[in-house]
Image (cartoon, helix red, strand yellow):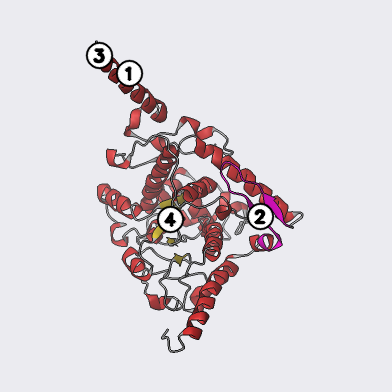
Amino acid sequence: MAREFTTLALCLSCLTIYLSTILLWGSEGPGIATKPAFANFHVDNRSEFIDVTQAGNLAATQSDVNLVTTRVAKCDRPVTNFVFMKVHKTASGSTFMVLARFGRNHNMTICFPARPEKARHKQLSYPSGKLTKNDCRPALGRNYTLIIHHSVMNKPAMDRVMAPGTKYIGIFREPLKHFRSIFFWNRTKFRHSKNPLGAFLDASGNREKRPYSKHHNFQAYTMGFPSNLMTSKNSSQIYDAIRAVAGWYSVVLITEYWEESMVLLRRKFCWTMFDILHTTNKLHALHTSKEHASLTDKQLQTHRRISNVDYMMYDYLNKTFWQRVTEEGPAFWEEVTYYKTLNGQVNQHCKSAGGKRVFPAGKWSQEFAIDLTFCKELKWREGQWANACWNVVARRNEKTRMKKPNVIE
């Protein structure tokens, strides 16, 4: 009788696990990560959600999919040693300022561009991937723990420059939206055409021989995809390289879901809600209807062809991003809603009163206070935040010189 009872209990346990799995992944099972049923809860503007079962050119493999039950991340201490790959025109400016404020507040040691012209354009190793400690202003007696300027991913070189245990943060935008944005940022040849984007694609459709430029495969190049493989016709080879590159990053932010990305970053890096507060002002908004001009099917196909690696990489990163969100469970969306509401209240306060205000602790946040200084800094631009990070290092350098006058820089 006891044996029969044990067998029955075991069967019921297996059935419970199976049903839980079905509820988590949907009727298709865990083979492909699909949009979770809770993805529409408490989230605005989700009409552009790209169902990962529809978006990709990349086949999912079992190694890509980690079936993890709903969990709450356990944090021991915040990550204070990271590199952010600042990709042009991907909301990287907004991200830069959040990360720079975190770096300043946590006394991180920034690798600040040694060359003034680089610093002026917020560049470090960009446009090449070459990087040594000589490219950074000296940090006397310390390893660097922060890179946030424009760079090209070169993990071996960055690992040599950075302190041990460095984490990497990436960012990626849907390639066509990225093309529309970056084109008007630096392109002049076709700017006065009725449809500059279409004219450019018509002209470059049969002549684009370079593996990458600012208008095609640029994000993949910046994130570290090998340029010698960009012209490969072997999709499996490209796919393997994408997986290898993606493996370097602890978190890859998706521009279209930037606030969701910031919440995921907060969770993965054990940060507080205060750490990811941001300005709601647009930094680099374009004021031209030409950016949104429609393109013909042929022009769209041309862009997908000449920027195929960017498309494949975005599909892969977008897919894995939503897998990670699924792993966080339905409470993730509750936190996203809380974050958006709290950040809106902070910005509204700074735009109106601007004095001291205490925000009480909540389910997703510790108690914190803001004041006139915080509100003033919320309006800072990238250069001001970069300088604030450098000032932390400069003050340390001065103390080191006072203690050890003969120290060599």
Instruction: Identify residue type, mark 4.
Output: Gly
Where does the magenta region start and end? 356-374
| Front residue of this view, candidates 91 and 324 | 324
Q: Hey, which residue is sitting farthest front in the picture? A: 2
Disc 1 target residue: 12
Percent coordinates x, y for residue 237 in the rendering: 25, 51
Sort mark 1 into few (<14), some (14-19) or many (20+) by Cα contacts within 10 Å.
few
- Quadrant housing residue 152: bottom left
Label 2 secondary element: strand
Nearest-to-viewer mark from 4 and 2? 2
Disc 4 target residue: 170
Sort mark 3 into few (<14), some (14-19) or many (20+) by Cα contacts within 10 Å.
few
Disc 2 target residue: 369
From the viewer's perspective, tell me whether residue 61 is left or right of residue 284: left
Q: Residue at x 51, y 47 (%)?
A: 263
| Front residue of this view, candidates 260 and 194 | 260
Q: Mark 4 vs mark 2: which is more N-terminal?
A: 4
Instruction: Identify residue type, mark 2.
Output: Ala
Disc 3 target residue: 2
Q: Mark 4 vs mark 1: which is more N-terminal?
A: 1
Query: How far apart are the two marked residues, 4 and 3, measured between alpha carbons?
Result: 56 Å
Q: Residue at x 48, y 57 (%)?
A: 200
Sort mark 4 into few (<14), some (14-19) or many (20+) by Cα contacts within 10 Å.
many
Q: Mark 1 vs mark 3: which is more N-terminal?
A: 3
Q: Looking at the picture, does residue 342 appear above or below residue 219?
A: above
Q: Mark 1 vs mark 2: which is more N-terminal?
A: 1
